[in-house]
Image: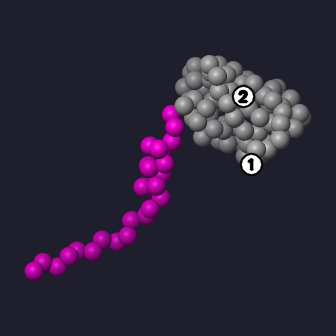
Amino acid sequence: MRSARRHAPRPLAPALEAVVERAAPRTTLARVQGAWESVAGPVVAAQSTPESERAGVITVRCFSAVWAQELELLSGDLMASLEARLGAGAVRELRFVTGTRRA
């Protein structure tokens, strides 16, 4: 009888990352949501969230009018970062609205 060769345990994280990536929706909104923190930065991402998309226009809900105004001023930079991350033409426009956090 041959002895079974034992292998060292493999990390679970790479396998889970692959499963999550394959299971993630491929919509423009999902892609923007997935990239938002790296595109906008952690401080901005904590104060805003992309919440809807229609014909390439992404609506980003900001948790205060000040943040909405600030992001409107930064929209050119945000668009350039989104294009670099998602490809040219993935997003036509960013629209910023004010509202409360959703549960």
Q: Is residue 47 magenta?
A: no
Residue 67 image point, x, y percent: 85, 36
Disc 1: which residue: 103
| Among numbered discs 1 and 2, the one appearing first in the sequence | 2
Residue 13 image point, x, y percent: 48, 59
Crowdedness near tag 1: few (<14), some (14–19) or many (≥20) residues, C-alpha within 10 Å: few
Distance CA(mark 1)–CA(mark 2): 18 Å
Residue 14 image point, x, y percent: 44, 55
The magenta-colored residue range is: 1-26
Residue 84 visible in the picture: no
Q: Is residue 30 left or right of residue 4?
A: right
Nearest to viewer (mark 1 / mark 2): 1
Q: Is residue 85 above or below residue 88?
A: below
Q: Secondary structure at mark 2?
A: strand
Crowdedness near tag 2: few (<14), some (14–19) or many (≥20) residues, C-alpha within 10 Å: some
Residue 10 image point, x, y percent: 39, 65
Disc 2: which residue: 59
For the point 79% across and 44% down, which residue is it?
101
